[in-house]
Amino acid sequence: MDFALSPEQRRLCEDIETFAVALSADLEGLRDDAAAGPSREIWRRCAEQGLTGLAVPKDYGGGGHDAVTTALVLEAFGRGCGDSGLVFSVAAHLLAGAVPLALCGSAAQKERYLPDLCDGSVIAALAMTEAQSGSDAYALSSRAVAHGDGYRLDGHKTWITNGPVAELLIVGAVSEDNTTTKGPATVSAFLIEADTPGVERPPAFDLLGLRSAAVGEISLHGVELGPDALLGRLGGGAGVFQCAMDWERTCLFAAHVGTVDRLLAQTVRFVKGRRSGDATLASRQAVSHQLADLKVQLEAARLLVYRAAWQLDRGRSASQHAAIAKLFTSETLLQSAITALRLHGGEGLRCGGELERAYRDAVAATLYSGTSEIQRNIIAAFLGLR
């Protein structure tokens, strides 16, 4: 790996971090609005900075950036933006919506949808998770049966990021006639416009953290689709889903590397200025060692994330590296939030403050994109242990 950034990469990261800091200031006081999702004005501003189409080819209105550059830019976004719900929503749209469509879609599908996904006029959501198939991703009850020259879909999805506000859904469903059959080879992916008859979306969940993101359920009742709604090949939904997960576990968690960097810098400034008796907190070894350990974890997380991105750019299997990066970075994010909150003392407990909010948001990172336990299962499988 070459650790030297190009002038373009440096400029992109500087511009995005500057943008994110300003945007974060504008969002102060709005971040805990219950599950409304980012406003269209905020979404438009993110799109104008290229965030909603970073890795989409330029022919379709995207930035045309590779995975490493995408990770770098999202790290800068996470470092500058204190609204983790917004970062989460934008990254989910890009990495689990636009990127799989760009990599797996037909020419007609890409021409039809990608320009709007890139310019922010359409939001995307990946709808795979069901009540009984979260960790067991392919044990789906949703069914797609042949109907005329197309398909009829029925099912219920839950914990769908951007689901309540998205205009375009990538939906996973079993496409075998035998309803007892389960497994990756039976799953297909379908592009569904959210205003299609039979699609129902209740209000978003009220969550502990990520409260500025819209996460919720989607019900499908006899949704009729033409043959052009199939994304990839019939029975190829597992490949679409894996593509989304490899990119999300890599580049979304690059944004979390940025958040850890911000929390560490903020805490270092605080302990340098806070006195305890005749010395600053920073001079206390019990304090400085905690922050030294966090710095090591930050640098390790960054290297793991960029190794996974480097694999993606070379067309190599990135699933193992993405799982390692996701596991380590999510746990590091949670630990950094706990450390920052504790070292700030009572100030860290103030409701509505950045540290209290960062702690609530960090808990979710160990759950979405596959729990820490699922990542360990994936890594164990690559070791031949499962």
Image: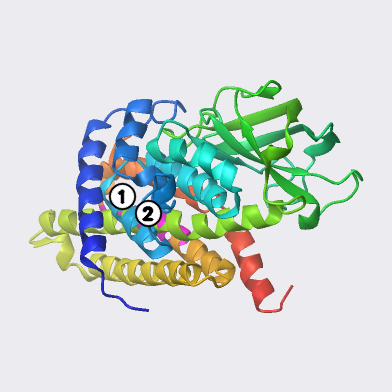
- Residue at 26% over, 54% down: 262
From where the camera sits, is residue 333 visible? yes
Q: Residue 255 has which mark? A: 2
Where the C terminus falls, by quadrant? bottom right
Residue 85 vs 96, above or below: the answer is above
Whether residues under marks 2 and 1 lie with C-beta atoms below 8 angstroms apart, the answer is yes
Residue 132 pos. (x, y %): 75, 43
In this orientation, which residue lies closer to the viewer: 77 or 64?
A: 64
- Residue at 80% over, 40% down: 141
Image quarter of residue 189? top right
| Mark 1 crowdedness (10 Å alpha carbons): few <14, some 14-19, many ≥20 | many
The chosen color scheme is rainbow
The question of residue 335 being in magenta is answered with yes
Residue 138 pos. (x, y %): 74, 51
Principal secondary structure, stretch drawn in magenta = helix
Q: Which residue corresponds to mark 1?
A: 77
In this picture, which residue range is highlighted in magenta? 330-343
In this orientation, which residue lies closer to the viewer: 212 or 89?
A: 89
Residue 371 pos. (x, y %): 59, 55
- 248 horizontally vs 105: left or right: left
Q: Amino acid at mark 2?
A: Ala
- 222 horizontally vs 247: left or right: right
